[in-house]
Every structure is written in structure tokens, then in C-alpha cells.
């Protein structure tokens, strides 16, 4: 594999898919998500635009899936240069109304999976002159939005882990960036009555992610916060 390889979790739609299409101009893309049909369509779109990509369909929070992803990445790509932790789960609820399965899902996707996938991918990231890890956080990690207690807490935990990991991996020449979007028009809103015209687009956030990856080697883009130009919604 001559091109640098970027692995993106939660890649079948929204920010993940937009980042894959943008980054495919310079990288071979390894897509990871649950929806195989969406992943196959995205690979076709990337190829039609002159890029290269492949995918692995599976639930990254399921037992054994992370090990399979690592094995498949090494087998098919032989290297890893960029690891983008984008998979996530969004749900709101007031104190006293949290559902345990939703709490568990948030913590698994926002904290457990990034920690463990990074740990398992380190040998690949370290084997080819270092690399870049990008964690997709949220302005909810630093701001107060009622009903977002569990989501905000999980994203805040992701941010603290990423900051410490950045310091621990400096000597290995692995950069760690955080991208914290504000309200972004993606599928997470479902049928909610929200004004999407006042939100960032997935492509806006993808550009910020690619900027952090493509920064000069001597520069560490520690954190990018990207919010709608109209201000908080």
C-alpha cells in the first residue's frame, strides 16, 4: 500500500462519510460501521471520484470486533497512518430518566472503543514513521445543555483521555487531535424539530478533521472547535 491509510469509525454517514470522501484525495480509506449497504455505496462513490477505499461492517462495541478490525486492517492495508474515532451515539434525557442500555452504549462508543482501538492499533501506527489520531468530541463536553448529562460526560471523558494520550505519544511521533463540532446537520437529530439551515454541515466538520491531519509534521493541531456561524442553537 503506497498511499497512507486512514481508518474511520462510524463511517457510513454524516461526518464520517464526509471525511472519507474528502480525505480520499490523499489517503486510502478503511471504513468501519454497522451498515454494510451504506459502506458499499460509499466505497463506490469514492472510487468514482478517483480514490480508493474498502470497508469492514460490524458493531465496534461488540465482543471481538476490535480485534477483527485490527487484523483486517493489517491484512488488507499493511499499515495505518490515521485513526479517526468518529463512531458515536446521541440521546437526551433528564436526570432520573436515563436508560441503562443507552448510557452503556454512549460510554462504549465514546470512551471504551477509542481507548481500546488505539491501544490495539499502536503497533501499526508506530511502524511507519508515526501517524495521527483524531477524536471527534463535541462542544457539549465543555458547555452546559440540559438533558445532555450522559452525552456530555462521555465526550468530556474522551477529551481528557485524548489530551493525556497526546502527551504520552509525542515521542512516538503520533499526533492526537480533537475536533469538537457544535450543532451539525446529520442523522443524529432524527425527526426532531430543529432548524438544520442554522447548523454546520458534515462537510464543514470534515474539512476541520482533514486540516488537523494534513498540518505540517512539526505542528500539532491540538483542538479545533467548529460551530455554526450564527452562534449556539
Image (spheres, rainbow, N blue to C red):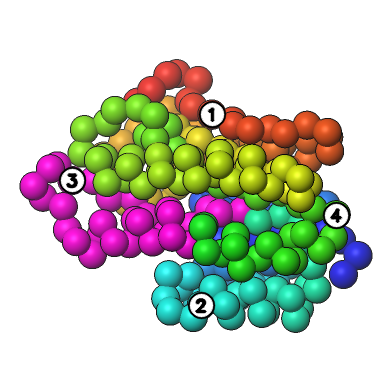
For the residues bearing labels 4 and 1, Cβ distance under 8 angstroms: no
Residue at 8% across / 47% down in the picture? Answer: 96
Q: Was residue 99 drawn as part of the magenta stretch in this picture?
A: yes
Q: Which mark is residue 225?
A: 1
* Crowd band around label 1 with a 10 angstrom C-alpha radius: few (<14), some (14–19), many (20+): some
What's the distance in space between the residues labelled 2 and 3, CA to CA? 29 Å
Mark before the other along the chain sequence, 3 or 1: 3
For the residues bearing labels 2 and 4, Cβ distance under 8 angstroms: no
What's the distance in space between the residues labelled 4 and 1, CA to CA? 28 Å
Mark before the other along the chain sequence, 4 or 3: 3
Residue 68 found in image quarter: bottom right
Mark before the other along the chain sequence, 2 or 3: 2
- Quarter in which the C terminus is drawn: top left
Residue under numbered circle 2: 65
Q: Nearer the viewer, residue 73 or 45?
A: 73
Callout 4: helix, strand or loop? loop
The answer to whether 214 is drawn above or below residue 97 in the figure is above
Q: Position of residue 65 (x, y in %)?
A: 51, 77
What's the distance in space between the residues labelled 2 and 4, CA to CA? 27 Å
What's the distance in space between the residues labelled 4 and 3, CA to CA? 44 Å
Instruction: Work out which residue is located at the far top of the displayed protein and give it.
Output: 230
Residue under numbered circle 3: 93
Amino acid at each position: 500500500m503506497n498511499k497512507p491509510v486512514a481508518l474511520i469509525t462510524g463511517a457510513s454517514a454524516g461526518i464520517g462519510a464526509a471525511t472519507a470522501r474528502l480525505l480520499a484525495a490523499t489517503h486510502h480509506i478503511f471504513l468501519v460501521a454497522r451498515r454494510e449497504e451504506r459502506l458499499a455505496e460509499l466505497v463506490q462513490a469514492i472510487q468514482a471520484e478517483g480514490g480508493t477505499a474498502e470497508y469492514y461492517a460490524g458493531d465496534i462495541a461488540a465482543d471481538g470486533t476490535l480485534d477483527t478490525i485490527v487484523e483486517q486492517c493489517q491484512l488488507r492495508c499493511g499499515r495505518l497512518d490515521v485513526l479517526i474515532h468518529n463512531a458515536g451515539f446521541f440521546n437526551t434525557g433528564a436526570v432520573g430518566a436515563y436508560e441503562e442500555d443507552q448510557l452503556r452504549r454512549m460510554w462504549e462508543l465514546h470512551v471504551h472503543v477509542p481507548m481500546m482501538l488505539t491501544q490495539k492499533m499502536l503497533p501499526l501506527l508506530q511502524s511507519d514513521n508515526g501517524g495521527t489520531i483524531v477524536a471527534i468530541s463535541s462542544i457539549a463536553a465543555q458547555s452546559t445543555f440540559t438533558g445532555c448529562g450522559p452525552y456530555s460526560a462521555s465526550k468530556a471523558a474522551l477529551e481528557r483521555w485524548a489530551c493525556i494520550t497526546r502527551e504520552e505519544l509525542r515521542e512516538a511521533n503520533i499526533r492526537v487531535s480533537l475536533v469538537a463540532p457544535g450543532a451539525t446537520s446529520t442523522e443524529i437529530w432524527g425527526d426532531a424539530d430543529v432548524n438544520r439551515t442554522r447548523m454546520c454541515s458534515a462537510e464543514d466538520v470534515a474539512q476541520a478533521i482533514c486540516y488537523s491531519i494534513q498540518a505540517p509534521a512539526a505542528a500539532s493541531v491540538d483542538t479545533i472547535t467548529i460551530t455554526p456561524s450564527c452562534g449556539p442553537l
